[in-house]
């Protein structure tokens, strides 16, 4: 990895990271960082139209039912992911023609995390990619594990 410092301010820093393989760039990431400081904090209330996590099948159960057993599904075993539904016909979510690609899941870690905020942030970044590919294929009627696709998650943003 080649790390290029772009900015180091009092509260904001940014880096460009390039992954190299055999001397060639295969991935580039731009990251911004902010010092932890007090500010507004809120969360939306739990949605009323969604079943509780205990009422939902696990993500593994859902995906194995659709695509069969595969070792790759167990990549996320450190997370307890509960599948609520998606926007496909029969997927359990109300039709909304303005938002055709939707999926709802409940997620928590299977074990308690340490109080270190950077661990929580790393877990959140990791799980942000969990359903990205599968929900992106929903409006196209193609399973994300289809042999008709070559898929990769290479460009998404978290704030």
Image (cartoon, rainbow, N blue to C red):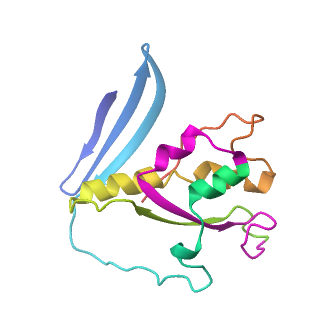
Q: Which residue is painted at 75% across and 76% down in the image? A: 94
Percent from the top left, x then y, of residue 150?
A: 68, 33
Q: Is residue 146 left or right of residue 1?
A: right
Percent from the top left, x then y, of residue 18?
A: 40, 29
Q: Is residue 78 left or right of residue 47?
A: left
Q: Which residue is painted at 74% across and 66% down in the image? A: 91
Span colored in magenta: 67-96
Q: Quadrant of residue 11?
A: bottom left
Q: Which residue is painted at 73% across and 36% down in the image? A: 149
Percent from the top left, x then y, of residue 64?
A: 65, 50
Q: Quadrant of residue 41?
A: bottom left
Percent from the top left, x then y, of residue 113?
A: 28, 60
Q: Is residue 87 left or right of residue 17?
A: right
Q: Is residue 120 above or below residue 46?
A: above
Which residue ends up furthest to the left in the rendered image? 10
Asked if the magenta segment contains residue 80, the reply would be yes
| Foreground of the two, 23 or 93 | 93
Q: Is residue 16 above or below residue 105?
A: above
Q: Is residue 38 left or right of residue 137?
A: left
Q: Quadrant of residue 69?
A: top right
């Amino acid at each position: 990895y080649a790390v290029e410092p772009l900015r180091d301010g009092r509260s904001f820093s940014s880096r460009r990271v390039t992954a190299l393989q055999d001397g060639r760039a295969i991935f580039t990431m731009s990251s911004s960082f902010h010092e932890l400081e007090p500010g507004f904090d809120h969360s939306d209330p739990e949605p009323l139209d969604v079943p509780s996590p205990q009422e939902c099948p696990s993500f593994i159960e859902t995906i194995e039912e659709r695509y069969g057993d595969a070792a790759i599904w167990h990549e996320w075993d450190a997370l307890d992911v509960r599948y609520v539904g998606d926007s496909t016909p029969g997927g359990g979510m109300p039709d909304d023609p303005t938002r055709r690609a939707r999926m709802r899941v409940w997620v928590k870690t299977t074990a308690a995390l340490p109080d270190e905020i950077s661990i929580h942030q790393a877990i959140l970044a990791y799980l942000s990619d969990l359903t990205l590919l599968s929900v992106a294929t929903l409006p196209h009627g193609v399973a994300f594990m289809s042999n008709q696709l070559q898929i990769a998650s290479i460009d998404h943003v978290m704030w």
